[in-house]
Amino acid sequence: MITAFSQCVDRDIALDIEGPEYDLAVPLINSRITIGRVAAESKGNTSIRIDSDGKATVVYNGDVIRRTAAAIFPPFPGILDNPIPDTLYDLPLPFGSPSNIFLIDRATFRNTRIFFEFEHDQPEDVQIRMQILNLKRNNQHFDQRYTLKYNGNFPNKMITPQFSIDGWELVSNTNTIRFYYEAVRPNGEKLRLKNAILRFDLILFSYIEGYLGYHIFGVDGNAIRIGLFNAWKSGGFNFEDPKIVLRVDNAFGLPVRSRVNKMQLTTVTGNVLSLESPFINTGIDFDYPGFNEVGKTKSTFFTFDKNNSNIREIFNEKTNLISYDIDALVNPDRDTTIKGYIDFDAFFNINVAAEVPLNGYVRELVVSDTISLDLSAFNSVLSGEFKIITANDFPADVSLQIYFLDAEGRRLEELFAAEGLVLPAAVLLPNGRTQKGQERTTFVPLSQSKLENMRKSDRVLIEGRLNTTGSAEGKSLWLYDDYGITLKAGALLKYKK
């Protein structure tokens, strides 16, 4: 709010008046800052959300972690030969292992080309018919014919042209491609080739279904910075229901479960406290689209709150950093009877956010901030007076003091006398809202000695003290979007040209 007010200062006052000394009235600020206005102008990862009743919640968003289908099935390069040692042979797909089983029921290839190498040792031409019995397109099996010609040298070899199987569908539940070939001599006799080898440029799928293995995706090294306590100096906060919210958008047709390895909150004093919850131990299962929902995305929200964790206790220790290390487990139970699917455009996103509903109380809270200052424009001011009109809609007594500091941090002057600029709390109504704050006028004399001390300073320390209504009894109150502070300020200056 201080930043917003500072942008309202009129910086274009003309002081071009003839004569040695003059009284000059200078308007400085005429502004009203509300929670709703701050919410509308919030940017970046921090925002204020207003619900339908006008209640305000501060939201701190972490990074969105995205994983695509290529994380499970990256393009598999054809760097190895794939021998077909017999006329009928089931060639294993290069996926899975004894410790991580794949059972591919159906798969559609994308941008994949295959070709063959044949070899025989007879001094004659051989006709070859190569079939892939579980690879179809338009209800037709893969069926290609080749002629391996005798060229007068042994052994006879040929490499076939590449053939695109883009859009061809493989149907299997054994993770294999089933080949059958016939090699026929000119006399009609069948023979087994000395060598038959499948090669491909890469294997890539546009769609694949079955039991697709167990996978772990790390989502580590992420943090959310919380700005609520940056200016804290002393005193207590108590928010009723701070939350950490996980949102997962899942387009994989597969079970996905979170595994929280670490969720820690660091306070402004440097203490590191761990979030505790049964769901950190058991994990959180995320929704996923079914076989009749290919291309759709299912969203899951899970909240760590005061009912299932210790977040309220540790957050109110004045958290300024939430760090987390989360794994996403695909097929977490390794149950091969649970079938799923992935299409080429599938993904899942994980977002972690901190939400702080502005419902609570503060007791004897002191906040402060230091900003740079340049009063060279006031070198010709001999004396003066500030007139400040304020109105406070918040259910909190606020007092403000501004200290002028030198380069070593010593206090040279304070702007307000005694307890400072006081903004009494607005009257609290039985429904928990406040009446509109009443305007209050404060005059601040600027003597020549006071101005001299102010001019010697190069920064100011702004210190605020707050107590919400009923804080001594632990009474929690909501902040609403129409709550605000009105500030009008002007100066009457005796000016020497």
Image (cartoon, helix red, strand yellow):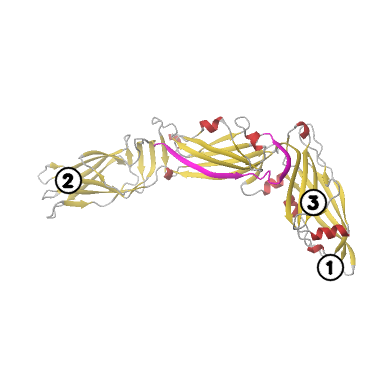
Name the amino acid, label 2: Lys
The crowd level at tag 2 (other Cα within 10 Å; few <14, some 14-19, many 20+) is some
Residue pointed to by mark 1: 16
Name which residue lies at 79% across and 51% down. Answer: 402
**Label 2: which secondary element:** loop
**Label 1: which secondary element:** loop
Residue 466 placement (x, y as % from top left): 77, 41
Q: Front-most of 47 and 313? A: 313
Q: What stretch is highlighted in magenta?
A: 212-240
Residue pointed to by mark 2: 194
The crowd level at tag 3 (other Cα within 10 Å; few <14, some 14-19, many 20+) is some
First in sequence: mark 3 vs mark 1: 1
User: How far separated are the C-alphas under marks 2 and 1?
Assistant: 104 Å
Residue 191 position by quadrant: top left
Q: Residue extending furthest left?
A: 187
Name the amino acid, label 1: Asp
Say whether residue 7 is visible. Answer: no
Residue 427 placement (x, y as % from top left): 82, 37
Residue pointed to by mark 3: 402
* Relative horizontal placement of residue 204, taking residue 490 as reference (left or right): left
Name which residue lies at 52% across and 44% down. Answer: 65
Q: In which quarter of the image is the C terminus?
A: bottom right
